[in-house]
Image (tube, helix red, strand yellow):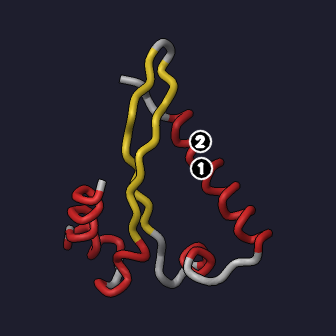
């Protein structure tokens, strides 16, 4: 995962396409693994998240949050992960 993250963050065309300044790349880009239920099997896949450094999500993620904001943020992230897993086109 560390090598995948490093390679993703080092990709100049990707950074340019997303408009993320070099000094914010580590805070704005993340990669994580999810899995999907594919009937009798499960499939793993990787998700790339890029946050606009000028956007609300970036601000919320990188500032001190209240307990309620933290719970809401985590709930939102888990719902997105569930959505992505449900949309995975098995094989």
- Count residues near mark 2 (Cα–Cα under 10 Å), then give few for <14, some for 14-19, many for 20+: few
**In x, y percent, where is residue 62?**
55, 80
Q: 14 or 36, which is in the foreground?
A: 36
Few, some or many C-alpha atoms within 10 Å of disc 1 (few <14, some 14-19, many ≥20)?
A: few
30 relative to 58 in the view: left or right: left
Quarter residue 69 falls in:
bottom right
Residue at 27%, 69% in the rendered image: 9
Question: Where is the C terminus found, in terms of image quarters?
Answer: top left
Which residue does the image show at 40% across and 63% down from the upper left? 30
User: Distance of mark 1 from mark 2, alpha carbons?
Assistant: 5 Å
Callout 1–callout 2 Cβ contact below 8 Å: yes
Question: Which residue does the numbered mark 2 point to in the structure image?
Answer: 83
Q: Secondary structure at mark 1?
A: helix
Indicate whether 68 appears above or below 23: above
Which residue is at the far top? 40
| Residue nearest the observer in this picture, 4 or 13 | 4
- Percent across and percent down for residue 86 are 56, 33
User: Which quarter of the picture shows residue 11?
Assistant: bottom left
Q: Answer above or below: position of 3 versus 44.
A: below
Q: Is residue 43 left or right of residue 80?
A: left
Residue that label 1 marks? 80
- The residue sitting at the right extreme is 68
Q: Is residue 5 left or right of residue 27?
A: left
Q: Position of residue 34 (x, y in %)?
A: 46, 41
The number of numbered discs placed on residues in the rendered structure image is: 2
């Amino acid at each position: 995962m560390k090598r995948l993250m490093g390679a993703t963050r080092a990709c100049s065309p990707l950074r340019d396409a997303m408009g993320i300044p070099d000094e914010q790349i580590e805070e704005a880009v993340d990669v994580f693994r999810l899995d999907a239920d594919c009937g009798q099997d499960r499939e793993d896949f990787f998700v790339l998240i890029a946050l606009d450094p000028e956007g609300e999500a970036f601000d919320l993620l990188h500032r001190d949050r209240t307990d309620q904001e933290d719970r809401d943020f985590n709930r939102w992230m888990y719902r997105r992960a569930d959505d992505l897993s449900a949309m995975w086109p098995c094989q």
